[in-house]
Structures are given as structure tokens and as C-alpha cells.
């Protein structure tokens, strides 16, 4: 936490004096101290990251209180470096504790968010029992025989490997056309977009407790809302759907899906798209009404 003490250290340097010769008056250092502290930067801490947060479960390793960082050994993947500071809230079994009581080797559940290119700890929950975790990403592979599920997460470079047991819940959420179809482990195919909640077993393996399928390759989805952006060159449009207040990036082929010149950002549109395991691709675009003033 040295970066928050630098201003105070600079101010303290102003009190150093030299022993005076006989008859010389010792200068009053008080004005220099006032000046140093008046010029010091005591601005408040920046706001917490506002991006999507992810919960990671694991064990703290290599805690460095000087650089404000620790390494988290995450169940199911490689260790990850996580930053923290005075904004981070720390709890032990649900009770708020001071930041300096954070200890290595603790089993923790960490709520994280990206701050620039770094992973930042918004809150750290130290637990007596092995922690739970949650991750979202695309399925890279699933082996029904062994139950191993591999998920690629945008938060980590390395894939997360989890164990899916016969009792693991697999459910669909989202639009009615998608959720009306029965869900099950047959949905665990490469490219499926999922949210996985998991526990750590006694062997340190990540065992999936619930898999929520958000999209499955080959499924159609309908998006209605304001056209936020339209790039004819790259074939990308973004629509803000008021039903969930989320923005969706949708690809389109200008040759196969001619878009009239009357369609502009700000217009209300309805887009039918197919999810192919990587992206949503528009197959129909209809303008609902003229853009709002």
C-alpha cells in the first residue's frame, strides 16, 4: 500500500534539520510542513470498476501487502494474480474485518472485476469451509464418460476444467423460444455459452453444482431495441435490448442481408439472429419505427 503513503513520506522529509552553530536561530520548519501537506495529493480513491464481476474460488498464495496483490490458486485452472487496495472489502465467515487481517493459505471466494488489464478484488470472503466459485464463458469441450467440462473464460487465459456429475443441474435461461426446449447435459456442446456455479471437493477439484446454458449453437434469438451502432464495412451492428438492458453485438453479411439506407443508429429495430457458437449472426432485420427525437 506504499503508493498511498508516498505523499505523507514526502511531507515528513520537511522536518529534517541541521544542528545550528552558536548564536544562530533555528528556523521554524512549520511553514515548510504546512506547504508540503498543502501541496500533497490526498485525493479520494477512484471508484470501483463498473464492469461485469466474476466470483472466483480458491486459496490465497504469495500475499504481498506492499504491492497490494496476491496469487489465487483457483480450483480448476492456473493461479491468477489479483490486485487489491483500500477499496476492497474483506469478510471472514460473513463478518467484515480489516484489510490487514488478510492472510495467505486462506480459502476464499473473491468477487473480481477487470480494472484496465488487471484483475481487481472488489470483495474477499474468507471461509472456514472450501469456497464456491462461479464462471461464465464458452464450452471448449465436454467428455460425458469422465464428466470433464472445459470452459474458456474471458477473465483468464487458461481454460477452467470442472467435473459434471449426473446430479449436476443443467438449465436454460433467456428467451422463451430457447427455454421452452428441454435442457440437459446434451446442451454441453462446444461453443455453448454457459454460466457455471461450482464447489471445490476434498481433492481440490472444481465440481459443477449448476450449469446455466445462455445460448446453444444453432439456436435462434430475437432482439428488439435501439440500434446503437451500425458498421457496414465490418458487418457489425449493436442493439440495446430494453428487456434486459444489455447491448448485443450482432454480425451480418451486407450481401445476404441488405440494409436500407433509411436504417440509422438510434432507430428501433427487431433483429432475428442465429448463434453459431462464436457470435450472433443476423438473418433478418426489421425497422420497427423511426428513431426517437
Image (tube, helix red, strand yellow):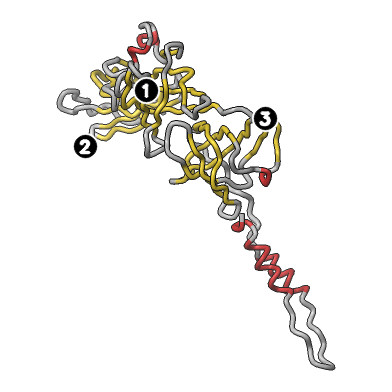
Residue 196, relative to residue 73: is it above or below? above
Residue at disc 1, secondary structure: strand
The image shows a total of numbered marks equal to 3
Q: Marks 3 and 2, Cα distance to the nearest angstrom?
A: 53 Å
Label 2 belongs to which residue?
Answer: 233
Quadrant in which residue 36 is drawn: bottom right
Residue 8, relative to residue 106: is it above or below? below
Q: Which mark is residue 148?
A: 1
Q: Mark 1: few, some, or many residues within 10 Å (few <14, many ≥20)?
A: some
Q: Is any part of residue 288 visible from this angle?
A: no
Q: Residue at x 63, y 54 (%)?
A: 43
Label 3 belongs to which residue?
Answer: 93
Q: Residue at x 47, y 17 (%)?
A: 210
Asked whether 284 or 137 is in front, the reply is 137
Mark 3 against mark 1, which lies toward the viewer? 1
The quadrant the N terminus occupies is: bottom right
Whole-percent x, y for residue 193 in the image: 36, 23
Q: Residue at x 19, y 27 (%)?
A: 253
Q: Mark 2: few, some, or many residues within 10 Å (few <14, many ≥20)?
A: few
Q: Mark 3: few, some, or many residues within 10 Å (few <14, many ≥20)?
A: few
Furthest-left residue in this view: 255
Q: Earlier in the sequence, mark 1 or mark 2?
A: 1
Residue 91, relative to residue 162: is it above or below? below
Mark 1 against mark 2, which lies toward the viewer? 1
Q: Are marks 3 and 2 in contact (CB under 8 Å)?
A: no
Quadrant in which residue 147 is drawn: top left
Left or right, 288 with reference to 112: left
Residue at disc 2, secondary structure: loop
Q: Earlier in the sequence, mark 3 or mark 1?
A: 3
Mark 3 against mark 2, which lies toward the viewer? 3
Q: Marks 3 and 1, Cα distance to the nearest angstrom?
A: 30 Å
Amino acid at each position: 500500500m506504499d503508493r498511498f503513503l508516498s505523499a505523507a513520506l514526502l511531507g515528513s522529509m520537511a522536518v529534517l534539520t541541521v544542528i545550528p552553530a552558536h548564536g544562530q536561530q533555528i528556523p521554524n520548519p512549520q511553514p515548510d510542513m504546512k506547504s508540503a501537506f498543502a501541496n500533497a495529493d490526498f485525493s479520494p480513491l477512484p471508484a470501483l470498476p463498473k464492469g461485469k464481476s466474476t466470483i472466483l474460488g480458491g486459496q490465497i498464495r504469495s500475499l504481498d501487502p506492499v504491492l497490494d496483490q496476491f496469487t489465487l490458486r483457483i480450483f480448476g485452472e492456473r493461479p491468477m494474480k489479483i490486485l487489491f487496495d483500500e477499496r476492497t472489502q474483506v469478510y471472514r465467515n460473513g463478518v467484515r474485518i480489516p484489510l490487514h487481517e488478510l492472510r495467505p493459505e486462506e480459502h476464499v471466494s473473491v468477487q473480481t472485476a477487470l480494472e484496465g488489464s488487471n484483475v481487481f478484488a472488489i470483495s474477499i470472503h474468507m471461509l472456514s469451509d472450501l469456497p464456491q466459485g462461479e464462471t461464465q464463458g464458452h464450452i471448449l469441450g465436454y467428455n460425458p464418460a469422465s464428466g470433464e467440462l472445459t470452459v474458456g473464460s474471458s477473465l483468464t487465459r487458461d481454460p477452467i476444467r470442472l467435473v459434471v456429475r449426473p446430479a449436476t443441474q443443467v438449465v436454460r435461461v433467456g428467451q422463451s423460444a430457447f427455454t421452452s426446449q428441454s435442457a440437459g447435459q446434451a446442451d454441453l456442446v462446444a461453443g455453448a455459452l454457459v454460466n457455471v456455479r461450482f464447489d471445490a471437493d476434498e481433492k481440490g477439484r472444481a465440481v459443477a453444482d449448476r450449469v446455466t446454458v445462455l445460448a446453444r449453437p444453432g439456436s435462434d434469438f430475437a432482439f428488439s431495441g435501439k440500434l446503437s451502432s451500425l458498421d457496414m464495412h465490418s458487418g457489425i451492428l449493436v442493439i440495446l435490448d430494453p428487456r434486459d438492458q444489455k447491448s448485443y453485438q450482432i454480425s451480418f453479411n451486407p450481401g445476404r442481408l441488405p440494409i436500407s439506407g433509411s436504417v440509422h443508429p438510434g432507430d428501433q429495430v427487431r433483429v432475428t439472429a442465429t448463434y453459431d457458437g462464436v457470435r450472433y449472426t443476423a438473418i433478418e432485420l426489421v425497422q420497427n419505427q423511426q428513431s426517437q427525437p
